[in-house]
Amino acid sequence: MGTVGTGVDGVDGERRQLINVAYRLLGSVTEAEDAVQDAYARWYGLSHARREEIVSPGAWLTTVTGRICLDLLGSARARRERYVGAWLPEPLPDRTEWNHAGAVVPGDPADQIVLDESVSMAFLVVLESMTPAERVAFVLHDVFRYPFAEIAGVLDRTPAACKQLASSARRRAAGAPGPAPVPEAGRADVVRHVKEAWQTRDIAALVGLLDPAAVMTADGGGLVGTVLRPVEGGARIAQYMAAIADRAPGLELLERTVNGTPGLVALRDGAVATVAAFDVRDDVVTRIWVIRNPEKLRPWAPENPEKLRPWAPENPEN
């Protein structure tokens, strides 16, 4: 899992990798940062002599971070039973799309996460169907390519048992829709058309853009108003979206990358109020994940909301 020096620079160089691992395991930027911080606290809590004995601090930190995440995943199941409405992973922004004047905060954990297929909302939702041990084995092996001999140290099981856990997780993932075969540009076009139809309250156009069996899931966490159960069926989703448009004057919709794929962000008074991720197949939307819980939108909201205004060149062409 990586070999680095025991100096501060060498150990701190593992932070980006650890954040990436922890976010995929937990689906939460905040919890991922806390887990990594806890792992580093344990590292620096060791005596100097003990740290010198550890051949690979990177492997040690990954093992400890994985164990912390495993414990959090176990307790999260109980917490989510008490969660108001549906629970969705925290959405990730692509900060390069925001105001170049300072939206990116150096050291922000959200900016250290690589935006690839393994952080798409569709993939993270599939991970939620796995047991904690399956998720750890699957993510570490299939996403980060760690050998089962090293994963065994995280799960405190034999390599053979870890291999079985990953295999079981793979079967769960196989039962879910695979990666959308639609090219990025095609997905962006569909999301753009959804935005335009929503803005014009064109229900017929929305219905045409949604799969008849589409499902929309919203997460407000009991802190803001939203539907508590998934809305099923393209026609019902279109009607719901149109009703929201009528009840929410003043919202500004922006096309922005959400977890590495085309999505929409709703601004109210310059601050992010809603983030929506989409799964697009055969040129129609099959799934919509709407995150409104303000606690999950922190990576989208620097202290100065004006930093989230869309960037434009100083002298745009007419």
Image (cartoon, rainbow, N blue to C red):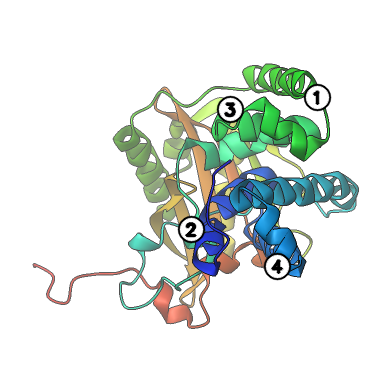
Q: Which residue is mark 3?
A: 142
Amino acid type shown at disc 3: Asp
Question: Disc 2 on helix, strand or loop?
Answer: helix
Picture coordinates of residue 267 (x, y %)? 48, 68
Amino acid type shown at disc 2: Gln
Mark 2 and mark 4: span between their CA atoms? 29 Å
The residue depicted at 50 percent of the width and 53 percent of the height is 113
Question: Disc 3 on helix, strand or loop?
Answer: helix
Picture coordinates of residue 181 (x, y %)? 41, 23
Picture coordinates of residue 108 (x, y %)? 52, 68
Q: Give neighbour class at mark 3: few <14, some 14-19, many 20+ (Cα, 10 Å).
A: some
Quarter of the figure that contains the N terminus: top right
Q: Is residue 297 above or below residue 228?
A: below
Mark 1 and mark 3: span between their CA atoms? 17 Å
Q: Give neighbour class at mark 2: few <14, some 14-19, many 20+ (Cα, 10 Å).
A: some
Looking at the image, which residue sits at the far bottom? 304
Mark 3 and mark 2: span between their CA atoms? 20 Å
Give the mark nearer the N terminus: 1 vs 3: 3
Mark 3 and mark 4: span between their CA atoms? 34 Å
Which label was assigned to residue 158? 1
Which of the two residues, 146 or 258, is positioned nearer the viewer here?
146
Mark 4 and mark 1: span between their CA atoms? 30 Å
Is any atom of residue 229 visible in this view? Answer: yes
The residue depicted at 60 percent of the width and 40 percent of the height is 237
Amino acid type shown at disc 4: His
Mark 2 and mark 1: span between their CA atoms? 32 Å
Which label was assigned to residue 48? 4
Q: Which residue is mark 2?
A: 112
Give the mark nearer the N terminus: 2 vs 1: 2
